Image (cartoon, helix red, strand yellow):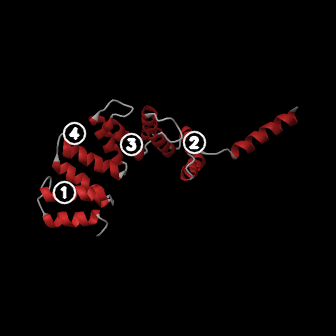
Amino acid sequence: MKVLSALFVFLLLCCSAFAASGEDYFDQGYNAYKDKDFIKAAESYKKACDSGESLGCVNLGVLYAEGKGVKQDHFKAAESYKKACDDGKALGCYNLGVVYAEGQGVKQDYFKAAELYKKACDGGEVMGCYNLGNAYAEGKGVKQDYFKAAELYKKACDSGDAQGCYSLGNAYAEGKGVKQDYFKAAELFQKACGGE
């Protein structure tokens, strides 16, 4: 009997060593998504998310938002983004910010959106900086502040975001948050088009 128990423990340890990790599930989901097998992608991303791979949560949220491989469910998309954001994934915070700004799956809340864009921007997600810049330019969720908007557009632009460069170019063309400068505006428009 002891031999069988020892054999069972040995087999259990061996099998668990070969069990897929969250990263493995994420890779499976990514490959399935590339192959347009959205059902398998959703299943794999869910396993990745449940295993602590927060990028799996982000991608699962996208599938829920778009209704690919799963029934479209904005509430579940928001839940997935929140889990990723809570785990420190800046992209999850950005996507959750968009959800709050648009009121999809959650009650529309520009203050919460701006807070999440800030968290995303601080975490290195360039689109978080760009959207937070828009929030400041439009006064949505924060007090309107063209100087702060220009600063955030610059941060996005300096990180290679074409929209950030374009919006900063507009700020220079209109003199909003920066001293009006048509030459600087043209330079930024060119950069937004892919030219340095």
Q: Which mark is residue 111?
A: none
Gap in angstroms between the C-alphas marked 4 and 1: 20 Å
Q: Residue 169: give x, y in percent of width and height.
A: 20, 59
* Mark closer to the observer (3, 4): 3
Is 72 on the left-hand or right-hand side of 157? right
Residue hosting label 4: 142
Give the mark nearer the N terminus: 3 vs 4.
Answer: 3
Residue type (three-letter) at the residue carrying disc 1: Asn
Give the mark nearer the N terminus: 3 vs 1.
Answer: 3
Q: Which mark is residue 95?
A: 3
Gap in angstroms between the C-alphas marked 2 and 4: 39 Å
Q: Nearer the viewer, residue 114 or 71?
A: 71
* Mark closer to the observer (2, 1): 2
Gap in angstroms between the C-alphas marked 2 and 1: 43 Å
Residue type (three-letter) at the residue carrying disc 2: Ile
* Mark closer to the observer (2, 4): 2
Give the mark nearer the N terminus: 2 vs 4.
Answer: 2
Q: Residue 19: give x, y in percent of width and height.
A: 67, 44
